[in-house]
Image (tube, rainbow, N blue to C red):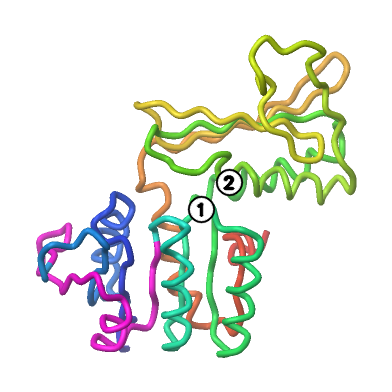
Amino acid sequence: MERLKIVVHGALGKMGQEVLRAICQEPELEAVAGVDIKAESTELPLPDSSRWIPLSTDLESTLGNYHADVLVDFTVAKATMPAVRTAVSNYVRPVIGTTGLSDADLDEIKSLCEKQGIGAVVAPNFSVAAVVMIHLSKMAAGFFDCAEIIEMHHEQKADAPSGTALTTAREMIKSRGKAFLHAPATSETIPRSRGGELEGIALHSVRLPGMLAHQEVILGAPGQTLKIRLDQINREAFMPGVILAIKKVVELKEAVFGLDKILGL
């Protein structure tokens, strides 16, 4: 069986390196090249030291030169959309873990894939535990009137609130069928001390060194609260989901949003 050829966009980043490491452990997959805006050399050693792969700042030529099947993107939102347009126009299927994409961006990804008849997987979080956390939060949403989400990440995370927190809130609201009840402060000594708000759900973002990715969903009712917590302590947590998406995306004929769709939740 011929291996799937993978190009990693953001190959020099922490997530890019973790993706390359995971691909090295999969006999059905082959990392054929890396692309990164910070590339200063033309080659990149794989994390398992098995070999070197080409490295470039030019995504379009890389996709064509190495006949990629899948593009894995862990970069920033402003770099992701040009990469998606380039990949899909070359019939290369994107697997996107970058967060901060707008609804308009997601609509464009869907439209581009429909036009070319190929699949894409876009997920704010590739952790299986995160997907289950969102699923449990959706199940609980119909039983509580009040909810808040606290998401905690490392200090270098650019977007706030996180894509996972936004997805959790939106799925809870959809499951509930109406907005939650929000308890605003009658007096705020510091503006926005109650955090942001999405249809009654208060969202709070913490950015600190020593953290990777964590989230707590708190639902409240008279005399009781329910907490659903996710802790991701290293980037290895995301890799089973990324590998599953890479293998699945070549079978798809449309864009899929969320790892839950692949897991059947």
* Residue beneath disc 2: 164
Q: Which image quarter holds the N terminus?
A: bottom left
Q: Residue flagged by tag 2: what amino acid is it?
A: Thr
Counting from the top left corner in percent of width and height, residue 19 is at 32, 59
Q: Residue at x 58, y 81 (%)?
A: 112
Comparing 229 with 158, the one in front is 158
For marks 2 and 1, the one nearer the N-term is: 1
179 within the magenta span: no
Counting from the top left corner in percent of width and height, residue 39 is at 18, 62
Q: Residue flagged by tag 1: what amino acid is it?
A: Thr
Mark 2–mark 1 distance (CA, rounded to whole Å): 8 Å
Mark 2: few/some/many CA within 10 Å (<14, 14-19, 20+): many
Magenta stretch bounds: 44-73
Q: Comparing marks 2 and 1, which lies closer to the viewer?
A: 1
How many badges with numbers are in the image? 2
Q: Residue at x 66, y 61 (%)?
A: 103
* Residue beneath disc 1: 99
Comparing 214 with 205, the one in front is 205
Image height of 184 relative to 256, above or below: above
Comparing 35 with 248, the one in front is 35
Mark 1: few/some/many CA within 10 Å (<14, 14-19, 20+): many
Q: Image check: 48 left or right of 31? A: left
Q: Which residue is drawn at 50% across and 31% down?
A: 152
